[in-house]
Amino acid sequence: MTLKRLALILMTLLVVARVGLALLGSLSEPQVQGQLELYQTNLILKAAEYAPDNPELQEPIQQLLGNAPYDNAAKQYANIYDSTNKTLQQLESQAQQAALMVNDGQMMAVNTAVDEIHRFQSQIHINLGILAAHSGDLDRAQTQWQAVIDGEPRVQPSGKTAQILSQLWQESAANLSPDAPEILESDLKGWFAGEALAQFYTVTDQPNALAQLQTERQAMAETALIRLGAIAFLPSVGGLVGMGLILFLLGQWLLRREKSLLASPFPAFTVPWDGETTLQGIVVGFFFFSQIILATTLPLLVSLAGLNPSGFDLRGKALYILFSYGVMTFGGLAILYYTLRPYFPLPEGWFQVKLWGRWPLWGLGGYAVAIPLVFLASLINQQFWSGQGGGNPIILLALQSQDLLALVIFFITASLAAPIFEEIMFRGFLLPSLTRYLPSWGAIALTSVLFAAAHLSLAEMLPLTVLGGVLGFVYWRSRNLLASILLHSLWNSGTLISLFLLGR
């Protein structure tokens, strides 16, 4: 066994351990999907306050918002609360293990995560109380707020807010804090802030302020309706087009069989290298460099430079992520280049980019087909993980991004840099390399699984595997990297735009 082969085996084992531990570790993290649903719930609550002048608009608005939006919101918050309790149980188990192993660093990290969940649960209690008060169930509302008031101040900083809300719905203005409105506006967001302030102005008998607030809430409700419509429009239209394309492809396969787009034979790639070279390109060029070398050295170098990325503002974090991805792309492609250099010139068809041809149709059609397929996979996926499984942290940063420059930086990272690098590595290199040992459908399937695993989230494994399958099929049939890059970019761009609209 050569030294190079031994090093490759060791790096592969390290990568498998790193990815496996990261996937298992994501089980103790709440799904990003749950927080996305809360953002959408809050947007629906805002929009539900809209009172249209034209009665004919009431029915389409109700169709957009659904029946009983306030009851649905309460159920959604209760479900998220239950899922955080499961996460707490897992964290407490980790804390016990860390205590037995006398691991102070892990104990500190676990305790910090526990405190964050308790603070999140405090906010859920407060919001559930406001929803209960809105529906007239004051006893339940007081119970929710009392749970926050009785909590430890260390992890329940919302106790003062809960105390103010409790007094307001008892219509007791005598002992209210003089800065109550500022506290409510600071601690509460969206519909919940509006509902609390409306009660404050009612109890303190400020009709002019109440009227001004109602005018502002109507304007915000109208804006929320527009945003909800925009969020629903593209997936709905794209999903319908995608379902039509899926039915067309299935019908063509039934009628034409071997001559259909789904069944006609794929042209084969000529693969001049063996499995060891393939392993070196993807393991070293993508996984080992990005998730071991870069993940350990970059934070150290930044720290030695006197910088703390966790303390950056939103623009700083966006730039740090873009810089990290730029280094990962440059380093990964350099490793791939030196891996394949002995085989230059490459056989025809490798890493093919053609500006002319039907690649835009393949990219757009693949995007439309991916919408219903990934949506179905996500629905199935939700039945397995019960709110756990982690998610991409960039999603939460993008949700918070009301800064246009930060959003542009996130767009460059997610919609340009990521599609180009990942499509070159997974579809341009790995997929055709695997056809030396696997049939085309097997190479597409294995590439899709590895593509999903690279995102280090169990909750995203199934949806990303399905998306990877569509990306692989589009590249294989178009034989143009621009087609899969376009599809990948459209997918990430649509996600970012939806997040921006949800978070506003």
Image (spheres, rainbow, N blue to C red):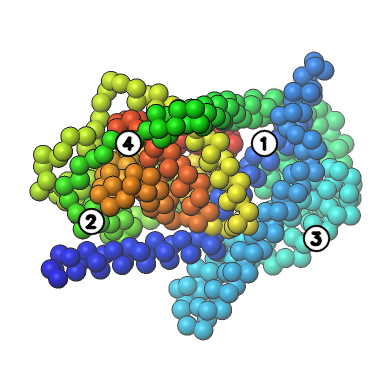
Q: Residues at badges 1 and 4 in contact (C-beta under 8 Å)?
A: no
Mark 3 or 1: in front is 1
Of the residues under marks 1 and 4, which one precedes in the sequence? 1
Q: Secondary structure at mark 3?
A: helix
Q: Which residue is mark 1?
A: 43
The quarter of the picture where residue 92 lies is bottom right
**Which amino acid type is marked by label 4?**
Phe
Q: Which residue is mark 4?
A: 266
Q: Quadrant of the N terminus?
A: bottom left
| Residue 423 x %, y % | 33, 40
Q: Which residue is mark 2?
A: 275
Q: CA distance from mark 3 to mark 1?
A: 26 Å
- Residue appearing at x 24%, y 40% in the figure: 269
Q: Which residue is mark 3?
A: 146
Q: Quadrant of the C terminus?
A: top right
Judged left or right of residue 49, residue 498 is left
Mark 2 or 4: in front is 4
Q: CA distance from mark 2 to mark 3?
A: 63 Å
| Residue 57 x %, y % | 77, 19
Closer to the camera, 177 or 265? 265
Disc 2: CA contacts within 10 A as few (<14), some (14-19) or many (>=20): few
Q: Is residue 490 above or below residue 53?
A: below
Closer to the camera, 428 or 34? 428
Judged left or right of residue 253, residue 227 is right
Q: Residues at badges 2 and 4 in contact (C-beta under 8 Å)?
A: no
Q: Is residue 333 above or below residue 367?
A: below
